[in-house]
Image (cartoon, helix red, strand yellow):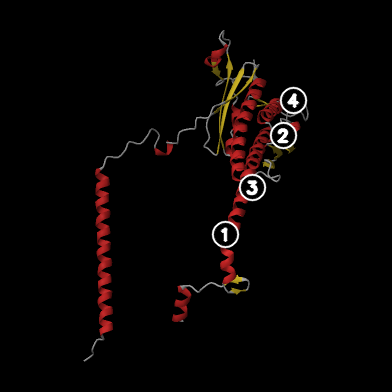
Amino acid sequence: MHVVQPSLRLATILLITGLALVVRRRRLAARQRALNMHQAAAEPKPTPPVGGWHRQMPSMPSIPFAEGRSNAVLAEARVLNLTPPSKIGSGICFFDHMLDQFTSHAQLGVTLRCGVLQDSPQPRVEKDCFAPLKDYATGLSSRSHDKDIFVACGTALGLALKRVVNEVAGEAAAAAPPSSAAQGSAVFCSPLDESFTEASIELLPPDERAGQCETRLEPYGSFGGEKGSGRKWVGRYRTDLTPAFWSALAIGLGCNLSIVKVRGGNAHHQLESAFKAFARAFRAASTTWQTEAHTVARRRARRQFRRVRRPLCRAAPRFHGRPRRPPSMCSWTWTLLG
């Protein structure tokens, strides 16, 4: 007759007891989940907002609009860094499409509205006579406010972008002192089909270069009334007013800007490539401060870690220049099993 050893009997009892405890714990957990589901089904569900839960967004910060005015045209713009897109209404549909490149390629939430100030005997309440340019671009006749729209929108956007630059530069300066290597400048070359445009921007230039703008985009396309003159209109957009917009934006932003066409045979692609190149260059220039601040922070953390770990590393035995680590449980297990 085989006699069971006391140690084997004790191990069997402990194994059966452990399995029983595991089964009991799983049953209690399943019962608790069923109870929670029953209570959740009994509670009244909140009513979703209009448009669904995915339409609900956090409240917009109370940031004032930057104003740009040219004669009777008033433009108001607000730019938020790294936020969803908003509404753009300049009165010229193709111009709105170009300004939307700031949202797509610079990760900026741009809000722009433009209108004509009607004649009013009370200048203090001139905003009450603010007529939005919703149907302005309905024809090519009597376009007396075209240049004013470009100048006012450029000034308002430049002032709004200036607030973003000051905010980013201030946060980076608080994290790390500014250095000569990061002064908020960048160059970006943007291809779009056959078009290719180069944009260079310096956000904080010296006083003698602040507000300067160089624009060389003519001719706009290879079509036009005269041979090689390019297109005068793209939809309801006057191509000859593009330099006026960039000049007003550079003055409002206080930057040194250069936008040069390398090649291009389509006016639409040419203009969109220019706006895209500026948006990408602005994003790259505004992130130089953040990159410098993060680099300095990483260096500081690395120095502190080395100061703490250096005595331990010297005291520990070394193998090929590195401290020898004790083997893990997995290595011991495979050693025993092998």
Residue under label 3: 292
In the depicted structure, whether residue 177 falls above or below residue 14: above
Measured as percent of width and height from the top left, residue 32 is found at 26, 55
Residue under label 4: 225
2 vs 4, front mark:
2
Q: CA distance from mark 3 to mark 4?
A: 51 Å
Image check: 268 left or right of 82?
A: right
In the depicted structure, whether residue 26 falls above or below residue 2: above
Dot 4 amino acid type: Gly
Residue under label 1: 305
Dot 1 amino acid type: Phe
Q: Residue at x 60, y 73 (%)?
A: 318
Residue under label 2: 256
Q: Residue at x 51, y 73 (%)?
A: 326
Question: Is residue 13 in view?
Answer: yes
Q: Which of the 4 image quarters holds residue 287? A: top right
Question: Is residue 218 in view?
Answer: no
Secondary element type, mark 3 = helix
Dot 2 amino acid type: Asn
Q: Which of the 4 image quarters holds residue 319? A: bottom right
Q: CA distance from mark 2 to mark 3?
A: 21 Å
Measured as percent of width and height from the top left, residue 41 is found at 26, 45
Label 1 or label 2, whichever comes before in sequence order:
2
Asked if labels 3 and 2 touch by Cβ distance under 8 angstroms, the answer is: no
Q: CA distance from mark 1 to mark 2?
A: 41 Å
Q: Quadrant of the N terminus?
A: bottom left
Image check: 30 left or right of 137?
A: left
Label 2 or label 4, whichever comes before in sequence order:
4
Label 2 or label 3, whichever comes before in sequence order:
2
1 vs 3, front mark:
1
Label 1 or label 3, whichever comes before in sequence order:
3
